[in-house]
Image (cartoon, rainbow, N blue to C red):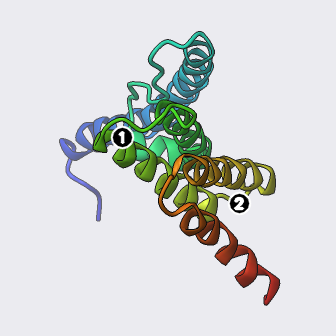
């Protein structure tokens, strides 16, 4: 039993379309690798120059897909947590409630990012920044500095028992 004569060209065209579509995904991923590399580098340069930095490029594939394939979510999360720490102005005196909110958000993000990061070096850096925030809060607190110190010592006591 042979296929009708009109089916052969259609089948060939369909095969070509599938091959082209299949080749487009690796090409798009390769372009996204270059975009991520350039954006991380440019974002770091901007951050170092104290200019608003972004570490999210415009990608051809969905951003979550390309970042998970490349395994850079933790790199971006680390950069954002450090940026948020410095934007919280930890050494500045607290003048308004927004200052407290900004520092609390930075502390939570540092803790969450440290818990999720697989790199011991980055976890240590994030934990150190969180400690600095809590100790600075204790130094600036005129009413309850011991609360902030205790909040920092609790995880250390828990780690001691592991």
Q: Which of marks 1 and 2 is nearer the N terminus?
A: 1
Residue shown at 81% from the left, 83% from the top: 160
Density class for disc 1 (Cα within 10 Å; few <14, some 14-19, many ≥20) is few
Tell me which residue sits at (29%, 44%) in the image.
Answer: 97
Which quarter of the picture shows residue 162? Answer: bottom right
Front-most of residues 69 and 51: 51
Q: How far apart are marks 1 and 2 (CA)?
A: 24 Å
Residue annotated with mark 1: 62
- Pick the front one: 149 or 4: 149
Determine whether the residue tagged by mark 2 lies in a helix, strand or loop. loop
When the figure is inspected, residue 58 is found, relative to residue 133, above or below; the finding is above
Callout 1: SS: loop
**Classed neighbour count for the residue bearing mark 2: other residues with Cα under 10 Å, few (<14), some (14–19), many (≥20):** few
Asked if residue 62 is positioned above or below residue 118 in the image, the reply reads above
Q: Position of residue 42 (x, y in %)?
A: 57, 15
Where does the image place residue 16, in percent across and percent down from the top left? 37, 34
What residue lies at 55% left-to-right and 37% top-to-bottom? 90
Q: Do residues under tags 1 and 2 come within 8 Å of each other at their CB atoms? A: no
Give the residue at mark 2: 118
């Amino acid at each position: 039993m042979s296929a009708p004569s009109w089916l052969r060209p259609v089948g060939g065209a369909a095969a070509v379309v599938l091959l082209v579509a299949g080749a487009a995904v690796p090409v798009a991923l390769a372009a996204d690798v270059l975009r991520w590399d350039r954006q991380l580098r440019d974002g770091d340069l901007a951050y170092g120059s104290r200019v608003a930095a972004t570490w999210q490029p415009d990608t051809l594939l969905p951003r979550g897909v390309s970042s998970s394939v490349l395994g850079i979510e933790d790199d971006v999360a680390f950069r954002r947590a450090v940026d948020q720490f410095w934007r919280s102005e930890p050494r500045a005196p607290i003048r308004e409630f927004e200052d407290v909110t900004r520092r609390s958000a930075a502390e939570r993000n540092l803790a969450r990012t440290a818990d999720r990061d697989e790199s011991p070096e980055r976890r240590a850096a994030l934990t150190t920044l969180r400690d600095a925030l809590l100790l600075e809060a204790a130094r600036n607190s005129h009413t309850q500095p011991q609360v902030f110190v205790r909040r920092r010592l609790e995880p250390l006591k828990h780690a001691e028992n592991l």
